[in-house]
C-alpha cells in the first residue's frame, strides 16, 4: 500500500484528570509532547501541527519543525480540537489528517503511515487501526476499547465491553481467549479535513455518552469508519503516573 501525503495533528491539552499537565511531564528529560512531535516528523508527514490550549505546551516544542495552533480550552474531545485547527489552518477538504494523541511518545511510524493509507484507499471519511487481543485480561478490561467490523472492514461498533460476545465459550470458559480473536481498537485516527468540520457539527451521541467514546458519534450519525490492522505493535500511551514510570523504563531499555 503506497503512502499518501498526509498531515499529522497532535492535540495536547494541559488539563488531564489522571495526570495533570501530562504533555509537559518529563520523559527522558524532555516533555512528553516533544517525543510525540518527533514521532510525527519521523513518519514523513507533509505538515505537523500541534493543537493546544496552553502557551507552555506550545513553548515546549520550540526548535522543532511544527506549526502551533492555539485552540479553545473547552473542547469535549481531541477531534473537536482538531476541527478548530482545520479551520484555522484552512486545510482543503480532501487533505488527509492523522490524529496522533499527545500522550503517545512511542507511536510506531508505520502505524501513522498505515492509517493515512487506509483512509486514502477508502471512501469512508475516517479511518482507524486495530490489533488482535491475545489475553483475557485485555479482553475484559474496560480501558481497552474493542471494535467489531463488517465484511468490508468498516466499524460496526466500538465498546469497552468484550465484543463480539462469544456466548457458548464464555458460558463455560472466560480464561482462554476465543479461537476467533476479538479486536482491540488503537485510538489513532485519520480524517479527511472536510469531515472534521462535519464532526464538530454533529450532536453528541447517546452511545458516545454511555461508552465515553467519541468515535461512536460518527457511527450514530450514519458515517463509516474504515478499520485496518496495525502493521506493528502499538505500545501503550501515558495516562497515569505508573504509565509514566513504565515509559521511563522502556526508554532506558531501548
Image (cartoon, rainbow, N blue to C red):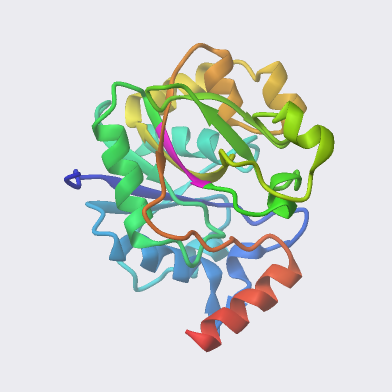
The one of 215 and 198 positioned closer to us in this rendering: 215
Q: Is residue 181 above or below residue 164?
A: below
Which quadrant is home to the N terminus? top left
Q: Is residue 74 above or below residue 24?
A: above
Locate residue 81 relative to residue 44 in the image: left or right.
right
The one of 188 and 227 positioned closer to us in this rendering: 227
Q: What residue is shown at x 56% (from left), y 38% (from top)? A: 180
* Quarter of the rendering containing residue 116: top left
Query: Does residue 40 show up?
Result: yes
Query: Does residue 90 show up?
Result: no
* Quarter of the rendering containing residue 195: top left
Q: Where does the image place residue 7, in percent across and percent down from the top left?
A: 29, 46
Q: What residue is shown at x 61% (from left), y 83% (from top)? A: 249
- Residue that protrudes farthest toward the top in the picture: 222
Report the label total: 0
Locate residue 145 relative to residue 5 in the image: left or right.
right
- Mainly helix, strand or loop, the magenta region? strand
- Residue that protrudes farthest toward the bottom in the picture: 252
Q: Where does the image place residue 90, in percent across and percent down from the top left?
A: 30, 33
Q: What residue is shown at x 66% (from left), y 54% (from top)? A: 135
Residue 201 drawn in magenta:
no
Locate residue 249 relative to residue 131 in the image: left or right.
right
Q: What residue is shown at x 72% (from left), y 17% (from top)? A: 206
Q: Where does the image place residue 246, in percent across and percent down from the top left?
A: 66, 76
What residue range appears in magenta? Answer: 127-131
Q: Is residue 109 above or below residue 215?
A: below
Locate residue 192 relative to residue 209 in the image: left or right.
left
* Quarter of the rendering containing residue 225: top left
Q: Where does the image place residue 250, in percent across and percent down from the top left?
A: 56, 80
Q: Is residue 60 above or below residue 133?
A: below
Amino acid at each position: 500500500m503506497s503512502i499518501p501525503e498526509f498531515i499529522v495533528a497532535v492535540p495536547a491539552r494541559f488539563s488531564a484528570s489522571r495526570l495533570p499537565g501530562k504533555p509537559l511531564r518529563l520523559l527522558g528529560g524532555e516533555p512528553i509532547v516533544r517525543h510525540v512531535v518527533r514521532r510525527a516528523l519521523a513518519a514523513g508527514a507533509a505538515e505537523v501541527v500541534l493543537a493546544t490550549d496552553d502557551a507552555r505546551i506550545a513553548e515546549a516544542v520550540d526548535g522543532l519543525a511544527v506549526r502551533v495552533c492555539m485552540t479553545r480550552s473547552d473542547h469535549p474531545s481531541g477531534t473537536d480540537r482538531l476541527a478548530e485547527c482545520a479551520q484555522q489552518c484552512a486545510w482543503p477538504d480532501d487533505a488527509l489528517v492523522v490524529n496522533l494523541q499527545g500522550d503517545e511518545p512511542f507511536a510506531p511510524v508505520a502505524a501513522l503511515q498505515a492509517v493515512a493509507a487506509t483512509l486514502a484507499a477508502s471512501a469512508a471519511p475516517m479511518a482507524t487501526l486495530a490489533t488482535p487481543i491475545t489475553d483475557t485480561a485485555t479482553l475484559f478490561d474496560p480501558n481497552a476499547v474493542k471494535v467489531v467490523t463488517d465484511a468490508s472492514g468498516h466499524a460496526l461498533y466500538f465498546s469497552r465491553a468484550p465484543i463480539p460476545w462469544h456466548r457458548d465459550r464464555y458460558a463455560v470458559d472466560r480464561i482462554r481467549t476465543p479461537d476467533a480473536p476479538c479486536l482491540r481498537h488503537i485510538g489513532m485516527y485519520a480524517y479527511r479535513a472536510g469531515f472534521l468540520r462535519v464532526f464538530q457539527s454533529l450532536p453528541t451521541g447517546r452511545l458516545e455518552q454511555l461508552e465515553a467514546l467519541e468515535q461512536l458519534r460518527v457511527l450514530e450519525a450514519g458515517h463509516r469508519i474504515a478499520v485496518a490492522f496495525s502493521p506493528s505493535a502499538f505500545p501503550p500511551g501515558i495516562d497515569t503516573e505508573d504509565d509514566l514510570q513504565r515509559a521511563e523504563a522502556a526508554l532506558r531499555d531501548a
